[in-house]
């Protein structure tokens, strides 16, 4: 079991780094480390076989310092509740958080079933799409330039641990998408085949990639031109469009039902 070290100074270099990682959604790109907080996320990280560099435990929750979660870290830190309040934006302070080394950016996997994010802006949407991708058997998520930072704190919280089981690519281009082996389907609110018709007619293949577009502008022209299918979701209630995260869940679930 790792022996805990108590830090009480807010000027400690580690705490300065944590405040920056928690507040700046793109800070991880400079530091190569991410901050995750809460027992759920920390447990999800460990369940995928990763070891955190540092576990940070709340002073009022020191029993966690003796837990298997905290003990797995290379280094164990205990800090006062007041200092954690300066780091975490959550209303209810997390009992534990991890400092984790960011996975090395690896090459795109052409054969992987992939979800392409075309400039999605909202971190909650991005995290939700990652959860759906992981749930429905898509193993790679490719974020084109202009998309929300995949490892930002808000996306991590919305992803609820999905990050740790996915192959994530950031800063990609439409040319990268063109190198994928499986054909591409793009979502649209106003054109293309209806998803339920494709399922009924068995026209939705088990092996395909999905692209989801910017919340306001939709899919870019390059991906629209490259797509084999343009797919829309019937909305008998009369709404103009669905939230992109909701549309992603419906489309990816449809693909999963074909692949089973």
Image (tube, rainbow, N blue to C red):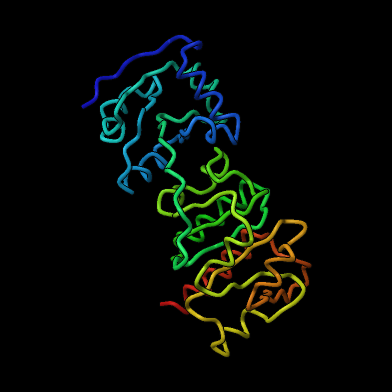
- Please state, as top left, top right, bottom left or bottom right, where the N terminus lies in the image: top left
Residue 89, position in %: x, y? 57, 29
The residue lying toward the viewer, choosing from 10 and 119, is 119
Q: Quadrant of residue 97?
A: top left
Does residue 236 sit above or below 54 in this rendering?
below
In the visual, does 231 lie left or right of 46? right
Does residue 196 sit above or below 140 in this rendering?
below
Residue 248, position in %: x, y? 59, 64
Residue 195, position in %: x, y? 62, 79
In the visual, does 128 lie left or right of 65? right
Picture residue at 55% right of the left edge, 46% below the top: 150
Residue 87, position in %: x, y? 53, 24
- Please state, as top left, top right, bottom left or bottom right, where the C terminus lies in the image: bottom left
Picture residue at 69% right of the left edge, 74% below the top: 232
Picture residue at 52% right of the left edge, 34% below the top: 28
Number of labels in the image equals 0
Q: Quadrant of residue 118?
A: bottom right
């Amino acid at each position: 079991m790792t022996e805990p070290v108590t830090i009480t100074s807010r000027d400690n270099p580690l705490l300065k780094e944590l405040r920056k990682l928690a507040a700046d959604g793109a800070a991880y790109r400079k530091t190569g480390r991410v901050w995750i907080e809460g027992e759920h996320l920390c447990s999800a990280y460990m369940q995928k076989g990763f070891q955190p560099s540092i576990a940070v435990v709340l002073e009022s929750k020191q029993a966690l310092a003796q837990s298997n979660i905290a003990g797995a870290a290379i280094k164990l830190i205990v800090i006062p509740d007041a200092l954690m309040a300066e780091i975490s934006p959550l209303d209810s302070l997390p009992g534990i958080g991890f400092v984790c080394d960011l996975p090395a950016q690896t090459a795109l996997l052409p054969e992987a079933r992939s979800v392409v994010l075309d400039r999605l802006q909202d971190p909650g949407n991005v995290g939700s799409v990652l959860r759906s991708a992981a749930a429905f058997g898509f193993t790679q998520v490719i974020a084109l330039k202009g998309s929300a930072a995949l490892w930002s704190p808000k996306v991590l919280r919305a992803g609820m641990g999905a990050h740790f089981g996915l192959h994530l690519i950031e800063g990609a281009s439409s040319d990268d998408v063109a190198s994928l082996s499986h054909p591409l389907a793009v979502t649209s609110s106003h054109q293309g085949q209806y998803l339920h018709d494709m399922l009924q007619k068995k026209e939705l293949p088990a092996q395909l990639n999905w692209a989801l577009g910017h919340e306001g502008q939709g899919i870019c022209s390059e991906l629209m031109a490259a797509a084999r299918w343009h797919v829309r979701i019937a909305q008998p209630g009369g709404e103009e469009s669905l939230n992109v995260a909701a549309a992603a869940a419906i489309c990816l679930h449809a693909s999963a039902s074909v692949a089973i």
